[in-house]
Amino acid sequence: MMSGKLSVNLLLRANFSRLWRSASFWTAVSVMFGAGVFELAVSYPHRDQPGILDNRYMIFVLMSGVVLSAFCSLFVGAEYSDGTIRNKITVGHSRAAVYLAELATCAAAGVLVCLGYILPITAAGVPLMGGFELPLTSVLWFTFCAFLMTASLCAVFTMAALLNQNKAVVAIICIFLAYFLLFLGIYLNSRLTEQAIIPAQEYIENGQILVREAMPNPSYVQGIKRTIYEVLYDLPGCQAVQLIAASEACPIRLPLVSLGTAAASTAAGLALFRRKDLK
Amino acid sequence: MDYILETKNLIKHYKNGKALNGLTMHVEKGAIYGFVGRNGAGKTTLIRLICGLQEPTEGTFTLYGCPNKSKEITKARRRMGAVVETPSIYLSMTAEENLKQQYQILGLPSYDGLKDLLELVRLGNTGKKKAKDFSLGMRQRLGIAVALAGDPDFLILDEPANGLDPQGIVEIRELILRLNRERQITVLISSHILDELSRLATHYGFIDNGRMVKEISAPELEASCRKCLRLTVSDARPLTTALDKMGLEYSVRSDTEVDVYEAPSVTELTLALHSAGCEVKNIHEHDESLESYYMNLVGGGSDD
C-alpha cells in the first residue's frame, strides 16, 4: 500500500515526463524553430541593413501566442480526453496541486517553445549577420518581457483548458483568443499612434505653391476612449505589438500587466476548478 | 463489522435533477461488492463522489473510517484505486509509459514491480505498442493496472465489462477474482451485466433512482432466490386451472410458460393436462436468477 506525502513536485515530474513525449510540444517547438530558420534565411541577403537582426529576433512574440494556444489546449485537454486527470485526483492530489502543476508545465513549455525560435536566430544569426544593434541589456529585457507575456497567455489558456472538458471547444476558443488579441493589438497600435495634429503642409496646385494649415487629426483617439485603448493595448497578446514597437525601452508596466494577468487568471481558475464537477 | 466504505444519505444534485437521492451503503472489507442498477440509477455518480471527482450536495461517507469532509480523506484515497467509466490512460503512450506516469504521480521511489504489474494484467508483451492501438479489453486491463500502481487495498471498477468481447469479460473476471483472493483487495464493481456480476460478487447493493433498494450478501441472495419448475405448454390456461385445483403457487410468464414454485406431482399434472387437451412441451428446474431477483426488486420500468 502506498504511503508518504503527495505534493505538486510529483505532478510536475510526471507532467514534464509527459511533455518530453508530447507530439504537440515538439510540433510547437519545430514550428517556432522553422520560423526562426525562415526569418534568418529571408533576412540574410539584407544583413547589411542596420538593426535587421534585432527586428527578426523579436518576431517570435507575434507567433508564440497562436502556437501556444494550440499546444496548451491539446496538452491540458488530453488530461480530460484520456481521463487521466481522474488518476491524479483519485489518489489524493489536491485540485490546487493539479492546477498549478499544469500551469507551471505549460508556462515552462511556453518559454521552451519561444527558445525554439530564439536558438537559430542567435546561434546562427549573430555570427552570420554581425550581432544585435541594440545593447545586450535591451535584448535581455525584451526577452524577459516576452517570456512573461508568453507565460501569462499560457496561464489564460490553461485556465480555459481546465475549466472546459471539451478539448475541441477549448482549442477553438484559445486559438481564436490568441488571434483576436494579436489583431486587436495591431488595430490599437494603428489607432494609438495617430498624430493629434496633422502638420502644416505645402503642396503645388496649378503651378501655385499652397499651404495647408496644421489641423487636429479627426482619427486621433482621446479622452476615456484613449484610456480604454491604452489599457487593452497592455494586455498580453496585444502587448506583443507594443513589445516590438518599444523594444529599446520596453516599459516596466508591460511585465507587471503580464504578471497581474497570470495571477488573476490563476486565482479565478483555481477558485472555479476547486468547485468543478469532474467526469 | 469492518467497513471500507460507508455512505449515509448521500444526495447529489445536477442541473437536470437528482442523481443520488439519499443513498446509504456499506462495503465490507474483503468483499467483492456488486453495485447493481440500470443506466442512470446513480452508480457512476456515487463512484465519482468517492473518488473526489465531485462533492456530494448533502450526506456523508467514510472511507476507511475517515469522513469525506475531513482533510485526511486524501490520505484515505491513497489506499484505493479506481477505473471510473473509461480507462484513464494516455493513449499516446505505451503500457509501460502509462504505468511509469502513475508511479511518478504517486511518488513511488522506483519502478520496481512495474513489470510484475504488467504481467498480472497480461500486458507484459505489448512492447512499444501505444495504448491507442490496444483493444478495448487491453485498455481496460491497463486501466486496472494503473489503478493498482499504488498497491491499493480497495479497488473501484465502474462497468469494467462494458463493450468487451466474451474473452475479454472472462479475462477481467479472472483478474478481479485473483486480486480479491490473492491480494485480499476489496472490490466495488458497478455493473448492469447481472449474469457476469453473479459469478463474482460476494455482496450486492441494488440501486434505483439514486436510492439503495437492498443490500444483501451472496449467500443470503442465494437463499432468497426461489427454485421453481418451469413448464412450457401449448396453452397456459388449462395448466393454471389444473394448478389452482392442486392448490400450488405459480406465476404465469407468458401464454405458454408457467413457473410452479412448489414440487407438484408431475404425473398427476401431465395427466390432468392431457385430459384438457394441453400438450406439455418442456419441463425443467429453474433457479430464480439475479436478473429476476433484481427485476422483482426494482420493477421493470424503462431506463431513465
Image (cartoon, rainbow, N blue to C red):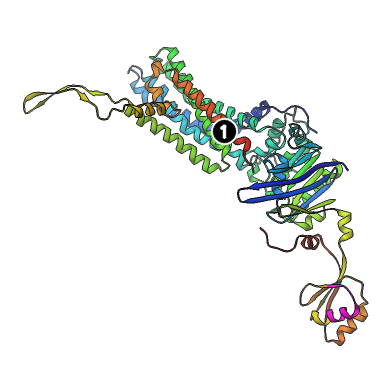
In the rendered view, tell whether residue A219 sits above or below residue B267. Answer: above
Residue B150 location in percent, x, y?
A: 76, 35
Q: Position of residue A145 (x, y in %)?
A: 47, 20
- Judged from the image, the secondary structure of the residue bearing numbered disc 1 is helix
The residue under the point 77% across, 62% down is B295
Q: Position of residue A232 (x, y in %)?
A: 41, 29
Helix, strand or loop for the magenta stretch, by majority: helix
Q: Residue B257 colored magenta?
A: no
Residue that appears at 88% across and 70% down: B261
Instruction: Give the labeled residue for mark 1.
Output: A269
Residue placed most toward the observer, A206 or B183: A206
Q: Is residue A29 visible?
A: no
Few, some or many residues within 10 Å of mark 1 (<14, 14–19, 20+): many
Please provide percent x and percent y for residue A268.
56, 32
Residue A262 visible from this viewpoint: yes
Horizontal arrangement in the rendering, residue A124 relative to residue B99 (left or right): left
Residue at the (37%, 28%) spot, across then down: A229
The quarter of the image holding the N terminus of chain B is top right
* Foreground of the two, B279 or A181: A181
Q: Where B296 sits versus A125, above or below?
A: below
Q: What range is drawn magenta here?
A: B239-250
Q: Is residue A10 above or below residue B160?
A: above
Residue type, label 1: Gly
Left or right position of B44 against A209: right
